[in-house]
Amino acid sequence: EALPLPSDLDPIVVHDLFIRLFSERTDSHQVTAGTMLWVQTDFVVIDHAWLWRADHDSFAHFKRMENPVQHALQVDGDHVT
């Protein structure tokens, strides 16, 4: 049985979302992401989302231009808030 499609009366709700792109300065490779969160449907409510590209490691070393992310949020749907 197919799931019902979301609608204005019954949207998809995404809440308390935590996405962090991070690597230690001592790591041998750099962490990258094209898109952290990609919404590809209609009628979505996003509540309390934290999309973070870390600018330092756990030792507070600042990492200029490291951990690159092209898009934190990409929306390809209608009625997304």
Image: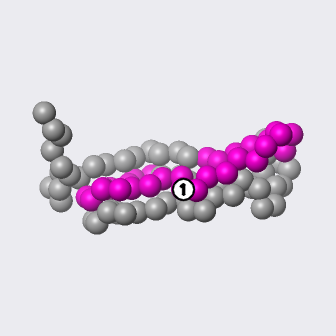
The total of numbered circles placed on residues is 1
Q: Is 25 situated left or right of 52 in this image?
A: right
Provide the residue designation for mark 1: 35
Nearest the eye: 1 or 23 = 1
Q: Secondary structure at mark 1?
A: strand
Residue type, label 1: Thr
Q: Quick one: 47 or 35, which is closer to the camera?
A: 35
Quadrant where the image shows the N terminus: top left
Q: Is residue 52 visible?
A: no
Please state if 20 lies on the left or on the right of 6 as rendered: right
Residue drawn at the location 32% of the way across and 63% of the way down = 77
Q: Write the residue at 66% across / 54% down.
A: 53
- Percent x, y of residue 38: 44, 55
78 vs 14, nearest the viewer? 78
Residue at horizontal 15%, vertical 38%? 2
Where is residue 39? Give x, y as percent.
39, 56
- Quarter of the image containing the C terminus? bottom left
| Residue at left offset 40%, top offset 63% | 75
Visible residue check, residue 14? yes
Q: In the image shown, does 26 or 16 lie closer to the viewer?
A: 26
Q: Which residues are magenta?
A: 20-48
Percent coordinates x, y for residue 70 in the rendering = 60, 62
- Which residue in the rendered view is the most extreme toward the top? 1
Q: Is residue 54 above or below residue 26?
A: below
